[in-house]
Image (tube, helix red, strand yellow):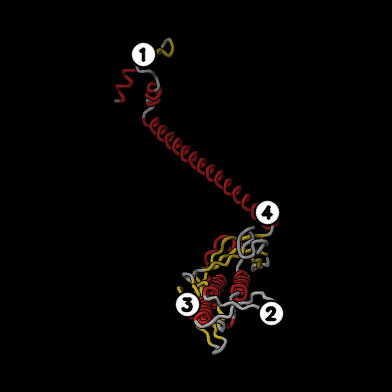
């Protein structure tokens, strides 16, 4: 806006100077020249049409200057709050070209698009990127946790004038930041540290979102979403969590080994039970037929063997034994 006004001022000065030079040139052509008592040339005394030309140039320059001072270019997605210092009234000019009363209007440009407010401990992130801006809050057990958070929000166009009149353009530092800090400390203090770390993180984020909305939307700030970017712990607690995870992994490994050994023991029991049952079956068969032992003996021999001489007095006919079992 200042550039536009300066451009108009330069144009007005240029137009006035041009009119003056034109009038001077016209006076010279009419041989109108005034000398002082020493014979030195003085400024020409314009006559008739020359004076009209000067006045017209001055009037045109003034009109041009007022025109440039009356025009405001409102970018896309923005709104311009205009305050008339004479009538003491406010209005909101939408995007595009806006006309304001020059000299008596005070203006302030507001971004009506989605805005981002981030508080983070990572260097280069957030509104205060030069410092650790994480929100440190005590949990239910009294342990400190740091929350990195992003709030997406925008202004209600119907309430921009009220925001400008009651809060001002630095509304994020006056309203958004204090509200977020207050809600996070309130919510985190109701949960255990492991809830924040893992299992109930989504639930915590939803609760923070709802409470921030209730707190600030009544003033014209629309909360689109609150995102928990990261959860931080003190160095001592982080080491304790790491040790616990290692212990859990060791316990899971031991559990696997025990389950494997138990299954192996169960397999051996089943195998022993099967062998015991087989022995009982063989014993019962022997009681009923003593020659069954010969069958078992022969069954283990090669198919090519047909006769066995066990001693000088005994010759066993394998074919007869096998045929008798068939």
Residue 149, image quadrant:
bottom right
Secondary structure type for disc 2: loop
- Mark 4 or 1: in front is 4
Q: Marks 3/2: CA distance?
A: 56 Å
The residue that appears at 53% across and 79% down in the rendered structure is 54
Q: In whole angstroms, how far apart are the C-alphas of marks 4 and 1?
A: 80 Å
Q: Name the residue under label 2.
A: 37
Pointer 1: what residue?
Answer: 307
Mark sitting earlier along the chain (4/3): 3
Give me the C-alpha separation between circle 2 and circle 4. 100 Å
Kind of element beneath mark 1: strand
Instruction: Give the label, 3 or 2, closer to the camera.
Output: 2
Q: Which residue in the structure is indicated by mark 3?
A: 98
Q: At numbered mark 4, what does the secondary structure look like: helix, strand or loop?
A: helix
Secondary-structure class at tag 3: strand
The image quadrant where one finds the C terminus is top left
């Amino acid at each position: 806006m200042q550039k536009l006004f300066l451009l108009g001022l330069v144009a007005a000065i240029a137009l006035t100077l041009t009119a003056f030079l034109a009038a001077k040139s016209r006076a010279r052509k009419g041989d109108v020249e005034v000398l002082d008592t020493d014979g030195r040339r003085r400024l020409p005394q314009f006559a008739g049409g020359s004076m009209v030309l000067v006045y017209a140039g001055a009037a045109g320059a003034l009109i041009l200057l007022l025109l440039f001072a009356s025009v405001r270019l409102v970018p896309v997605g923005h709104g311009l709050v205009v305050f008339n210092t004479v009538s003491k009234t406010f209005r909101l000019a939408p995007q595009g070209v806006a006309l304001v009363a020059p000299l008596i209007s005070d203006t302030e440009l507001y971004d009506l698009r989605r805005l981002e407010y981030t508080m983070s401990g990572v260097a280069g992130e957030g509104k205060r990127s030069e410092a650790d801006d994480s929100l440190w809050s005590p949990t239910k057990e009294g342990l400190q946790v740091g929350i990195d958070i992003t709030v997406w929000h925008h202004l209600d166009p119907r309430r921009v004038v009220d925001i400008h009149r009651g809060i001002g353009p630095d509304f994020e530092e006056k309203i958004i930041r204090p509200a977020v800090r207050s809600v996070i400390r309130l919510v985190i203090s109701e949960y255990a540290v492991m809830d924040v770390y893992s299992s109930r993180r989504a639930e915590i984020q939803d609760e923070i979102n709802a409470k921030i909305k209730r707190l600030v939307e009544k003033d014209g700030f629309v909360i689109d979403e609150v995102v928990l970017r990261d959860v931080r712990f003190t160095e001592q607690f982080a080491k304790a969590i790491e040790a616990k995870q290692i212990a859990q992994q060791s316990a899971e490994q031991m559990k696997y080994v025990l389950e494997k050994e138990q299954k192996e023991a169960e397999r051996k029991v089943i195998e022993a039970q099967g062998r015991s049952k087989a022995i009982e079956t063989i014993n019962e068969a022997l009681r009923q037929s003593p020659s069954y032992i010969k069958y078992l003996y022969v069954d283990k021999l090669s198919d090519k063997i047909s006769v066995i001489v066990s001693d000088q007095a005994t010759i066993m006919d394998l074919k007869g034994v096998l045929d008798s079992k068939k």
